[in-house]
Image (spheres, rainbow, N blue to C red):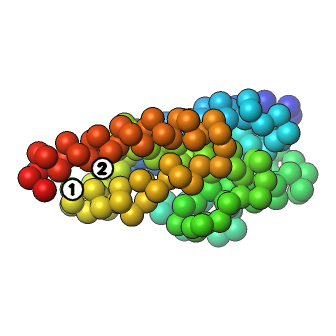
């Protein structure tokens, strides 16, 4: 099977896997991360397109907040269906493993593919989408509005300065500014 066909099947797989999810880690999030990765990839011709885009699509299929899997079990099962070489599967899984903010604090991915997918995912945590996702997830796990606001300070406002690629840095700066405007308005409306 051609790589583009596998990527199309990965899109369908994530749509099925995340059907009914409304906490911000849904198929639409995955598609936005994929599109962000495509955009950033244009500036990195040395990066492996298939590894990058596959990892972007599969980056949440074993997320510890969503699944009780180990060693990228869902991603590996999907990739093995297409009889990909073990080396390719490992490269995709290695790329997926550098995406998580909580598991990779302070660490920069070593590969172009990892840098791209990490940035692509983090961009979706910024701006208007990032704000919406924060409150969707907060509602799911029972966070109050103030607890969700604290998440901006604990994580989201740090992301702009942790981008790896120039393309992501430009997008992140604009989205970061939008979030700081939102937080100022929130503080004004709540009298803080």
Task: Give percent across and percent down for residue 13.
Answer: 62, 41
Pointer 1 and pointer 2: residues touching (CB < 8 Å)? yes
Judge by depth and name the residue closer to the eye, 20 or 40: 40
Residue 150 appears in which quarter of the rendering? bottom left
Q: Residue at position x 78%, y 37% from top?
A: 44
Q: Is mark 2 on a helix, strand or loop?
A: helix
Judge by depth and name the residue closer to the eye, 177 or 140: 177
Q: Distance between the residues labelled 1 and 2?
A: 8 Å
Quadrant of the snapshot with the C terminus: bottom left
Q: Residue at position x 68%, y 55% from top?
A: 96
Q: Name the residue under label 2.
A: 135
Dot 1, how many residues are within 10 Å of its Cα: few (below 14), some (14-19), or many (20+)?
few
Residue 139 appears in which quarter of the rendering? bottom left
Q: Is residue 126 above or below residue 77?
A: above
Q: Name the residue under label 1.
A: 145
Query: Is residue 180 in view?
Result: yes
Task: Give percent across and percent down for residue 1.
Answer: 86, 34
């Amino acid at each position: 099977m051609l790589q583009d066909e596998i990527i199309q099947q990965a899109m369908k797989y994530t749509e099925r896997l995340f059907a009914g999810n409304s906490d911000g880690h849904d198929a639409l999030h995955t598609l936005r991360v994929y599109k962000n990765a495509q955009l950033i990839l244009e500036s990195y011709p040395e990066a492996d397109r298939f590894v990058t885009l596959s990892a972007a699509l599969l980056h949440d299929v074993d997320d510890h907040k969503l699944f009780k899997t180990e060693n990228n079990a869902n991603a590996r099962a999907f990739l093995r269906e297409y009889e990909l070489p073990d080396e390719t599967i490992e490269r995709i899984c290695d790329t997926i493993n550098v995406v998580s903010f909580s598991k990779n604090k302070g660490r920069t991915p070593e590969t172009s593919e990892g840098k791209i997918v990490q940035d692509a995912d983090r961009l979706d945590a910024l701006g208007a989408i990032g704000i919406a996702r924060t409150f969707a997830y907060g509602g799911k796990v029972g966070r109050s509005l103030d607890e969700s606001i604290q998440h901006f300070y604990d994580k989201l406002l740090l992301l702009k300065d942790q981008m790896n690629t120039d393309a992501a840095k430009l997008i992140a700066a604009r989205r970061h500014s939008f979030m700081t405007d939102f937080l100022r308005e929130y503080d004004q409306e709540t009298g803080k």
